[in-house]
Amino acid sequence: EDKVVQSPLSLVVHEGDTVTLNCSYEVTNFRSLLWYKQEKKAPTFLFMLTSSGIEKKSGRLSSILDKKELFSILNITATQTGDSAIYLCAVENTGNQFYFGTGTSLTVIP
Amino acid sequence: DTEVTQTPKHLVMGMTNKKSLKCEQHMGHRAMYWYKQKAKKPPELMFVYSYEKLSINESVPSRFSPECPNSSLLNLHLHALQPEDSALYLCASSQALGTTKPNEQFFGPGTRLTVL
């Protein structure tokens, strides 16, 4: 059975801390792995990763994929209260189906 | 225009009502999706349309009836829903199914549905 597992389920940190969110997957015919940030409404796209070892970076956020070990990490440095959200990992297979993990709930305390 | 719009934003309906959720995108995407999301859970796929044809139906009860009138619009018709159907209903679109390229999904803001 295809599945995506995220850890930790929730995390509380102080502003300025660095956090690492994990996503492991077992999906047949992998095509891509996507990270989303979800606040009160729809998920907003952060990164799409298709190749191992190539870091994607956007401001204080970065992400990398390891296709051999079947996982990805999302790093957030110098966290701010606006980073508080649920971070979702999704994996797309070659049949264009998307499998979502349960998400990591991040709370950043001032 | 990289936006997926959904209406209404909120909907409260009784178990005997018939209502429809609407989704629209003008990005030229040919794959459109309906997801259901309960509180503190990830989105669950309900339906996928590819080139206006139903491609995937994840064993969704018949009280949910999708419709894709054209390549920009996706509807979800609701009839005789149950209180447990209360959730956030998300629409998404992507380039197309069957493409060899990775296929980013864009999500709409969702419709928060409450069934009384």
Image: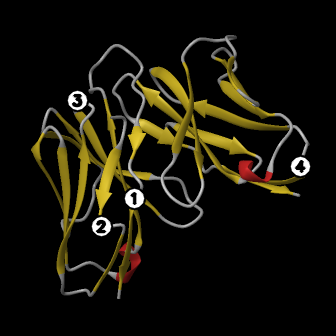
Q: CA distance from mark 3 to mark 4?
A: 40 Å
Disc 1: host chain:
B
Q: Secondary structure at mark 2?
A: loop
Disc 2: host chain:
B
Q: Are marks 4 and 2 in contact (CB under 8 Å)?
A: no
**Could you say where residue B100 lies in the image, as x and y percent from the top left?**
34, 13
Q: Residue at x 39, y 25 (%)?
A: B103
Q: Is tag 1's residue or tag 3's residue first in the polypeptide sequence?
A: 3
Question: Looking at the image, which residue sits at the far left?
Answer: B69
Q: Residue at x 18, y 41 (%)?
A: B72
Say what amino acid the circle numbered 4 marks: Glu
Q: Are marks 4 and 2 on the same chain?
A: no
Q: Residue at x 83, y 34 (%)?
A: A77
- Name the residue nearer the viewer: B83 or A60: A60
Q: CA distance from mark 1 to mark 2?
A: 8 Å
Q: CA distance from mark 3 to mark 2?
A: 22 Å
Q: Secondary structure at mark 1?
A: loop
Question: Which residue lies under the disc numbered 4?
Answer: A15
Q: Is tag 1's residue or tag 2's residue first in the polypeptide sequence?
A: 2
**Could you say where residue A20 lies in the image, as x and y percent from the top left?**
81, 36
Question: Which residue lies under the disc numbered 2?
Answer: B8
Say what amino acid the circle numbered 3 marks: Gly
Q: CA distance from mark 4 to mark 2?
A: 36 Å
Q: How many marks?
A: 4
Disc 3: host chain:
B
From the image, which quarter does the N terminus of chain B lie in? top left
Q: Residue at x 63, y 16 (%)?
A: A67
Disc 4: host chain:
A
Question: Which residue lies under the disc numbered 3?
Answer: B28
